[in-house]
Image (cartoon, rainbow, N blue to C red):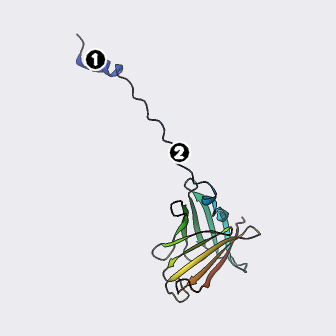
Amino acid sequence: MISFAAAIAFAQSAAPVASAPPPAPPPPTCAGADYEAFDFWIGEWDVFPNGRDTQVARSKIEKLYNGCAVRENWMPLKGAGGGSLTGYDPTTKRWTQTWIGSAPGPVYFTGGPVSGGMILTGEWKGSGPKGEDGLTRMSYSRQPDGAVRQHGEFSADHGLTWQTSFDLIYRPHKE
């Protein structure tokens, strides 16, 4: 006579083995001109005020997440740092950036490529020369020597007039 345990073992050995599900297809990449419009900013940089040779920061800009994002790690030589995450939104056909620094709360920018560069604009509380709230417009442009200029402008009147708030040159980092 066969034992109950032996009968179960025999039944299990005769059962068909379930095959593993097929692997999931890889996610679509964020490739193409729309997703590559900000690639000129990728690199490791020494940052200087425009027209000066006194370094104020280092910055590491990386392309991440299957090519869908550009991340900055801003490392000033004095003071607290911050960072941004920027990406192209195919639904709106706009670039968005979220900046988080040493002040509370994020700052959100939107924009897109212009003449081989990038312009991003957003409301930035307390960013005016007297600490007032207003718009900040950042223009990024490639320079002939391989550097990147980041020109920041502030507007307290909803973009009718602008004044320079920062003007930085990102030069390739040298060890």
Q: Residue at x 68, y 76 (%)?
A: 48
Q: Amino acid at mark 1?
A: Ala
Q: Residues within 10 Å of mark 1 (few under 14, many from 20)?
A: few
State the SS at label 2.
loop
In the depicted view, which residue is nearer to us: 18 or 10?
A: 18
Q: Residues within 10 Å of mark 2 (few under 14, many from 20)?
A: few
Q: Residue at x 48, y 38 (%)?
A: 23
Question: Is 171 situated above or below 131?
Answer: above
Where is residue 39 drawn, in percent x and y? Answer: 65, 61
In the depicted view, which residue is nearer to us: 89 or 142?
A: 89
In the depicted view, which residue is nearer to us: 95 or 99?
A: 95
Name the mark nearer the viewer: 1 or 2: 2
Q: Residue 19 appears in which quarter of the rendering? A: top left
**Where does the N terminus fall, quadrant-wise?**
top left
Question: Is 20 situated above or below 10?
Answer: below
Q: Residue at x 60, y 75 (%)?
A: 138
Question: Is 134 situated above or below 8?
Answer: below
Q: Is residue 69 left or right of residue 10?
A: right
3D distance between C-alphas at marks 1 and 2? 44 Å
Residue 26, numbered circle? 2
Q: Are marks 1 and 2 in contact (CB under 8 Å)?
A: no
Where is residue 49 drawn, in percent x and y? Answer: 68, 79
Q: Amino acid at mark 2?
A: Pro
Residue 6, numbered circle? 1
- Answer with mark 1 or mark 2, whichever residue precedes in sequence: 1
Farthest residue in the bottom direction?
130
Q: Is residue 92 left or right of residue 164?
A: left
In the depicted view, which residue is nearer to us: 173 or 129?
A: 129
Where is residue 14 drawn, in percent x and y? Answer: 35, 19
Q: Residue 84 appears in which quarter of the rendering? A: bottom right
